[in-house]
Amino acid sequence: MTSAKSADSQNRDIDQMLKDKMPALGIDLGGTKIGCAPVADFKVIGEPSKVPTPKGAENIINTLVGLIEEARKKHILRGVGIATAGIVDTETGEVIGSTGNLPGWAGTHIKKEIETRTGLPVHVDNDANAAAYGEVKALGLSDKTCVVAVTLGTGIGGGIIMKGQLFRGAHYAAGEIGHMRSNLNNHRLCTCGLFDCWESYGSGRGFRATAKELLTNVTVDQTPLAALLPDPPVDKVCAAAQEGDIIAKRIVDAWHEHVCAGIVTLAHTLDPDCFIISGGMAKFVDYDFLKELVIDKCLPRVGERLDIHRSSLGDDAGIIGAAQIALDNLVAG
């Protein structure tokens, strides 16, 4: 009898070990595209799939289910983690605050819809929160008191990790750092409907707005960038700055000042161990210059002890973070 029980116990242990190695599917849902890939040990398995984001909640749900079923043809999935723009009630998996990039998305019960149709456990979180969680885990920063992840892209998103755990706030809206007010003059209208949010200055959209302002009334004799109005591309402005174009350098420096302004506000509010910068605009950041600006504008005890890291996961941060949250929730459950 004892031998039979021992064999059963060993079989359960083996089953659990195999289960622990099963990947979760990470899905990063953005306003223009959806990326997904199976994830295990903080790494994507294979090349992530990418499809355009359709319009309308029903079409998005259908697309997500299709991606999950396609992944199940090649992998045995333990669960699904979904990172989406907007404010998410992580208990129910409902989008409770939409974003201009996904009109009509608020009120969608993502978790319920997809669990019903796939039979898999699903966790839904804000995209910047998911990216932050993935970065902190991958960089081994879970023991830090506070880490703030800043996603610089078309807009600005953020995630706050305290002692390895996401801080979501009383209404699941913590980390909406892109909407800190940066100016009192009602100068730039943000996509959220408010004026002068940090992302109106420090994002890719903000960079282009600054470039447009500084290039207005400038001739092509002064800089070839004047010919690129009304929407000068970020990469061309940054390339021109590196080649010594004075006006381009003024634009890039102004953008760094705008990025710095938000980081300094967060540094004085949260006193974090470090910041992690990710997103499509991260590659244009001069990290040494940004750190100098932050030290110059912070209280000495705050700025001098602050680290600013570049993302270790790159474009896969949302996918990996979403999947890892799902896997960790399954273990905790």
Image: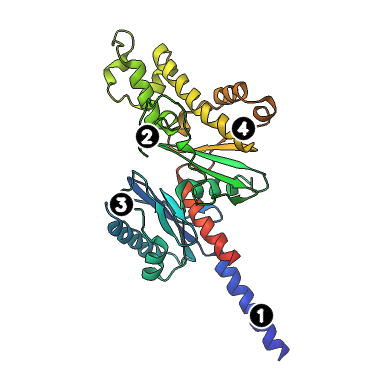
Give the residue at x 35% y 25%. Answer: 209
Q: Which mark is residue 190?
A: 2
Residue that carries the numbered disc 4 in the rendered image: 268
Residue tagged 3? 104
Does residue 13 appear in the picture of this structure? yes
Q: Earlier in the sequence, mark 4 or mark 1?
A: 1
Label 2 to label 3, Cα distance in Å?
18 Å
Instruction: Name the N-terminal-most of marks 2 and 1.
Output: 1
- Secondary structure found at label 1: helix
Query: What amino acid is labelled 3 in the image?
Result: Gly
Q: Farthest bottom residue?
A: 1
Q: What residue does disc 1 label?
A: 9
Reading the chain from its start, which is encountered first: label 1 or label 3?
1
Q: Disc 4 or disc 1, which is closer to the eye? A: 4
Q: Amino acid at mark 1?
A: Ser
User: Residue 154 appears at what percent x and percent y?
Assistant: 38, 36
Tag 4: amino acid: His
